[in-house]
Amino acid sequence: MKAIEQIYIDGAFVTPHGAERFDLFNPATEEKIGEVRLGDAEDARAAIAAAKRAFPAMRRTSPAERIEMLHALRDAVAAKADALTEAMATEYGAPQSFLAFSVPYAAGVFEMAARTVADYAFTRRIGNTDVIMEPVGVAAAITPWNSDIGFICSKLATAIAAGTSIVIKPSEMSAIQTQAVTEALHAAGLPRGVLNIVNGYGHVVGTALTQSPDIAKISFTGSTATGRTILRAAAETFKRVTLELGGKGPQILLDDADLDQAIPHILTSAFRNSGQACIAGTRLLVPAHRYEEVSSRLAAAVSALKASPSSDPTSDIGPMVSAKQWERVQSYIRLGQEEGATLLAGGEGRPEGQDRGWFVRPTVFTGVTNDMRISREEIFGPVLSVIAYHDEAEAIAIANDTDYGLQSYVLGTDGDRMRRVARELEAGRVVLNEAPMDPRAPFGGFKHSGIGREFGAFGLEAFLEPKAILG
């Protein structure tokens, strides 16, 4: 049983003022595996004060000094790869494919940030004016449970690159992972107060961060509903805000697609991170004349997917993070049937062979129309809706008929045609044929999927303000 009794403030592990405790579970077994002592508003204020003290020296650091810090963080995370992977497997239960990606990614974001700093012009001359890009002020980050280590590292990397200090409030459900990554980051030897991490509830610690006049910047990843609340609170003190929120990503399968290549891409996009991903392509748009062919291929492919614990190297899909999330996904699978969609694969209950754990049967609905709730609301589980279209214009219209606009997908064989379709989609990112991620490309959403961008120069500038000196 893991007992997490400390938070991280001013360069040290300290006992929080808050005394409330939160139970931690292994989602593959439903067993309690630990508990965390949560911070409260007073702990948040102490962390903010530490970050505020650290900010003046941090803002004066040179790009070279920031690159040195980023490299130290990269090396510290890489050195703890085994411990981080074990924590994620135990507390989150992701399949090994996602585990194999996650920790190298977490170390890699520091390297990518260092390269961005090296290439970025923090000072430039425009006419008779010097334009200086300065850190906006003390930052706060609020991160979700579906990639705890990666989000903590990516938001910290951007803060360091910009030359600011930060307070991070991770999800309380990820406290074992947070402890492991905090220990790794501590080993990098950042100046005191530059990094502060406070476990706690969103309505307690998160609210203290968003309301504090000493926080100049909020970076939040999570639900659209929570993002809306943060945006309102941040407006009171004119905080700069980056919000990466929900998604209901369309996958447009063009009529020239090679199904041998496309079907694996479709499943990867729809069920990545066990479906617990804001970028998941959960609406598949299929040409009407290929609908039966695609449905048949999908039924066979999905039936071969395996939902099982991280310890199983053949696992394709891990458990949902909690009993609450499992129940939420089950409710949408019931809803899809009530709405009149056809259950092509999967369905309610646990997968065959799993009598415990919050596992969901990978599910595909056909006969879906874009006005059904299963095709409009973010389910955050391995549930795919298949929608027919008659021509390219209708496919684009259906894809854009959503409140969201985070990540879309186009599958086909004609590169020029795919790019033409991609330009018509209302989304922050469009992926062609499951192209690999570019870690320095901007990431963020249109519409209700968020405000602002992360990664690369675009993410860096979200933490900076331009100062013009004329003369």
Image: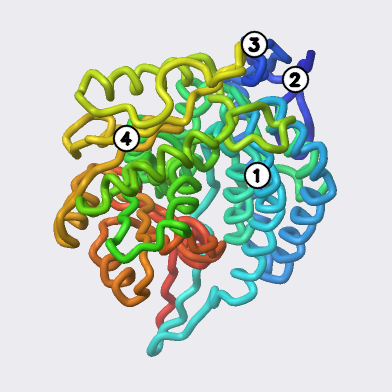
The residues tagged by marks 2 and 3 sit, at their Cα atoms, a distance apart of: 9 Å
Circle 1 residues within 10 Å: few <14, some 14–19, many ≥20: some
Residue, disc 1: 97
Q: Disc 4 vs disc 3: Cβ atoms closer than 8 Å?
A: no
Label 2 or label 3, whichever comes before in sequence order? 2
Amino acid at pointer 1: Ser
Q: Mark 3 points at which residue?
A: 21
State how far apart marks 1 and 3 are (Cα).
32 Å
Q: Position of residue 302 (x, y in %)?
A: 47, 37
Q: Nearer the viewer, residue 46 or 197?
A: 197
Q: Distance between the residues labelled 2 and 1?
A: 28 Å
* Residue identified by numbered label 4: 228
Q: Can residue 233 be seen in this view?
A: no
Q: Which of marks 1 and 4 is nearer the N terminus?
A: 1
Label 3, secondary structure: give it: strand
Quarter of the image containing the N terminus? top right
Using residue 161 as the reference point, say whether residue 89 is left or right of it: right
Rendered-image quadrant of the C terminus: bottom left
Q: Identity of the amino acid at label 3? A: Arg
Farthest residue, direction bottom: 127
Q: Identify the element where label 2 is drawn.
A: strand
Q: Which residue is drawn at 37% across and 37% down?
A: 384
Q: Do the residues labelled 2 and 1 touch (CB within 8 Å)?
A: no
Report which residue position mark 2 lands on: 4
| Position of residue 93 measured from the top left corner of the image (x, y, whole percent) | 65, 29
